[in-house]
Amino acid sequence: MECLDTLARYLMYVFIIDFALEGLDVIQRTYTAEESFDIIYALVHGHLFETHIIFQLILGTLIPIALIGWIQLKQVPANVRVSIYAVCGVLTLIESSSCVGTS
């Protein structure tokens, strides 16, 4: 169980770094205000809304961060932690498969 807890903690750190880098990318594109921002804005609000916002951002990043963070802050029984880790793993796989089509 200690190994799973450590792996989940590292996964949370990687998710936080990924979320920060994606946010910095959006900030950089907004700052430069080139035509690429207009194109990305149109794609995110159109064709890529499901894959980028719902799958990648919400399901693939924010929910696993919240679940693993909740486990780190509260005393959660081992069987519940294993279930939450499994859900986070599945969400990670869904997020990584949705990123393949958008790259």
Image: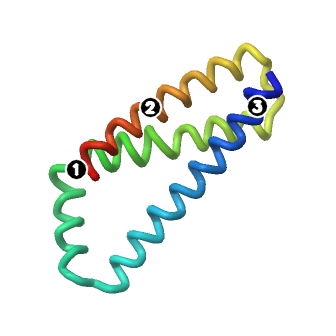
Where on the picture, by quarter, is residue 81? top right
Distance between the alpha carbons at the discs numbered 2 and 1:
18 Å
Alpha-carbon span between mark 2 and mark 3: 19 Å
Q: Is residue 73 left or right of residue 81?
A: right
| Vertical placement of residue 46 versus 2, above or below | below
Badge 2 element: helix
Q: Which residue corresponds to mark 1?
A: 48
Q: Position of residue 44 (x, y in %)?
A: 24, 57
Q: Which mark is residue 5?
A: 3
Instruction: Indicate the amino acid at tag 3.
Output: Asp
* Image x and y of residue 24, in percent: 47, 71
Which class describes the residues within 10 Å of circle 3: few (<14), some (14-19), or many (20+)? Answer: some
Residue 17's x, y, as percent? 58, 57
In the image, what residue type sits under mark 2?
Leu
Left or right: 89 in relation to 6: left
| Residue behind mark 2 | 93
Name the amino acid type tagged 1.
Answer: Leu
Label 2 Cα neighbours within 10 Å, binned few <14 / some 14-19 / many ≥20: few
Question: Which mark, by number, is residue 103?
Answer: none
Mark 1, residues whose alpha carbon is within 10 Å: few (<14), some, or many (≥20)?
A: some
User: How many labels, in total?
Assistant: 3
Tell me the element at label 1: loop
Residue at image location 69% in from the left, 43% down from the top: 10
**Element class at badge 3:** helix
Residue ID at (23%, 65%): 40
Circles 2 and 1 in contact, beta carbons < 8 Å: no
Between discs 2 and 3, the one toward the N terminus: 3
Which residue is pictured at 72% across the width and 41% down the height?
Answer: 9
Q: Looking at the rendering, in which quadrant would you find the N terminus?
A: top right
Inter-mark Cα distance, 3 to 1: 34 Å
